[in-house]
Image (spheres, rainbow, N blue to C red):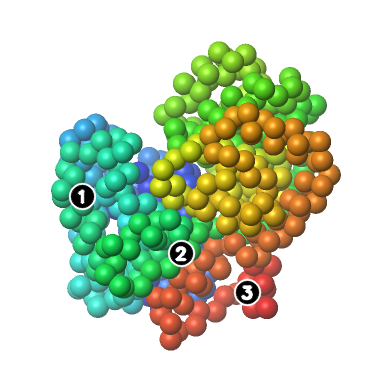
Amino acid sequence: MRILVLCSDTGVRIGDGKGASLHLRAIAHAFAALGHEVEVVGIAPSNPDDAHGWTMPVHLVPHPGRSEGLERERRKLAATESIRVLALEVAAHLRPELIYERLSLFGTAGLDVAAHTGARHVLEINALLTAEESAWRGLHLVSLARQREAAALGAADLRVTVSDEVRLAIEPYAAGRPSITVPNGVDTDLFAARPDREQARAAFGLPQDRVLLGFTGSIRPWHGLDVAIAALAGLPERIGLVVAGDGPVRVQLEQQALTLGVGHRVHWLGALAHERVPQMLATCDLALAPYPKLPNFGFSPLKLYEYLAAGVPVIASDIGQIRLALEDGRWGRLVPPGDAAALATAVTAELSALAAARVRAEGAREYAMTRHGWTERAVRILRAANPRRHPTAPTRNREVNALAG
């Protein structure tokens, strides 16, 4: 099958290392691994070399540049129009049978391409972006954003949401048309190897004799890293926190750590190439997903599945899809969201029974590697989009063997 993958979100650049960009790359490569002809249209990365790792043709629109307020929204509109024009050009030679589009603010390129080609239009929804943008950044062109979002959600042949919470939120727009939930997944090839802990700590310049808690991902207010730092202040001196990622609130969090007297115990690694995440997680005794108490939590945390695949014991906030992903605590310890004291208590409990936690983590690793890989995600999407066609996968890893079984 010929598949055109589209993304006009200026914050989700082709080749960048943030979770949304990794998701886009992973699903495109999973389609290709299943034997389909795939081409991608999206926003160029800040470093042109970052787009070279893609194994299929990638067609890029320049990023419109950073700005604020109304000008930021105008630039987003211009970028979505450029994506639409380029996507139509690519579709003219690819003749896609399926359009797979990530929902983007103001983005309706998939609708036009589907109308011109007759291809089925599958829309991936990670959040209702008009509401999200309004809540976190403010939005001037609200009416236009709502209109375009409703048009995309209402016209798609299939909506793929990353959580049940998001699926319920889009139902008013779906008009009875099909929707399915397909959570984020994990790159099973990347996590197949188990880096040596001592060597990994040496590579990052981390102390060999300290208990290390780990956090990966962009550093944004809704990821709860402030909760982890507050919890660290209630834990013994021998326990440290390793942070792989960067973002707009890092400076504030560094100041929080200094104020609480734990600045020397937080190891900031900065943004890492995704290929180094397994090595970073190998340095950790426990991995944290400390989300705060957020209304309408609809995330499907990529970090959570990577923690499981790395075989590291997990402590995560009991919110949204996380309870389902951890099977009510079978694969990790759940704590109340936003509660630093509860997080510190959970860390103490895990460390006091670390052998049992590691046994559980090994089971969680096998579960993630065989049931939560991107190939499995792609198979589910294509079955729902084309129920009469059955995609087959190469038998090269445990994930695919499990699917076959």
Q: Residue furthest bottom?
A: 388
Q: What residue appears at the point 45 percent right and 70 percent down from the top-left corner?
A: 381
Q: Disc 2 and disc 1: Cα gap in Å?
A: 24 Å
Q: Secondary structure at mark 2?
A: strand
Label 3: which residue? 403
Can you give x and y, in whole percent of width and height, for residue 357 in the image? 77, 46
Q: What residue appears at the point 55 percent right and 67 percent down from the top-left corner?
A: 375
Q: Which kind of residue does numbered mark 2 sit on?
A: Thr
Q: Say which quarter of the image contains residue 103.
A: bottom left
Q: Which kind of residue does numbered mark 3 sit on?
A: Leu
Can you give x and y, in whole percent of width and height, for residue 369 in the image? 66, 61
Q: Is the C-beta separation of discs 2 and 3 under 8 Å?
A: no
Nearer the observer, disc 1 or disc 3? 1
Label 2: which residue? 181
Q: Disc 2 and disc 3: Cα gap in Å?
A: 18 Å
- Residue 405's place in the image compared with 100, above or below, is below
* Quadrant of the image containing the C terminus: bottom right
Can you give x and y, in whole percent of width and height, for residue 219 in the image? 48, 33
- Residue 377's place in the image compared with 132, above or below, is below
Residue 145: image tag: 1
- Sequence-wise, which precedes: disc 2 or disc 1? 1
- Sequence-wise, which precedes: disc 2 or disc 3? 2
